[in-house]
Image (spheres, grey):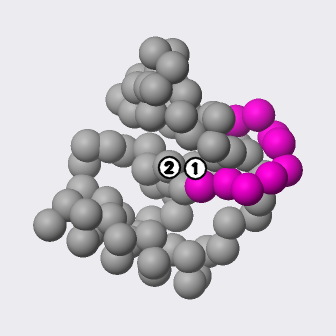
Amino acid sequence: MHNMQRAASHKWLRAHFPLRGVCSDCGAEKRTHRAYRLHPKPYTKNPDDYIELCPKCHAKFDGYFGKATHAAQAATST
């Protein structure tokens, strides 16, 4: 269910709010991804609930480098 909801939300966002190609964190102009700021809450179609990040910043946001977690990042970016 979680993955289906995520996929549907992302598909809708791609159709209505295309990515700009600029990282919201470091400002790099390259390939970007959408990161959900309110994890673990259910995914939404509200574009304000997402940030656009380059792969490196998205990995940091997800905590892959031990520097951030979704909850900590969401708390500091609201």
State the image coordinates of residue 37 (x, y, percent, origin top left): 44, 44
The residue sitting at the bottom extreme is: 15
Q: Is residue 45 above or below residue 55?
A: below
State the image coordinates of residue 8 (x, y, percent, origin top left): 34, 76
**Magenta stretch in the rendered image:** 25-33
Q: Is residue 56 above or below residue 64?
A: below
70 sits left or right of 78 in the view: left
**Which amino acid type is marked by label 2?**
Ala
Question: Residue at the location (51% across, 20% down)?
Answer: 65
Pointer 1 residue? 51
Tell whether position 31 is magenta. Answer: yes
Q: Secondary structure at mark 1?
A: strand
User: Toward which corner of the image does residue 18 lie, by quadrant?
Assistant: bottom right
Question: Residue at the location (45% across, 78% down)?
Answer: 11
State the image coordinates of residue 40 (x, y, percent, origin top left): 26, 43
Contact (Cβ within 8 Å) of mark 2 with mark 1: yes
Specify whether residue 73 is in view: no
Question: Residue at the location (32% across, 65% down)?
Answer: 6
**Which amino acid type is marked by label 1?**
Ile
Specify whether residue 23 is in view: yes
Question: Residue at the location (59% across, 55% down)?
Answer: 33
Pointer 2 residue? 35
7 sits left or right of 67 in the view: left
15 sits left or right of 26 in the view: left
Tell whether position 11 is magenta. Answer: no
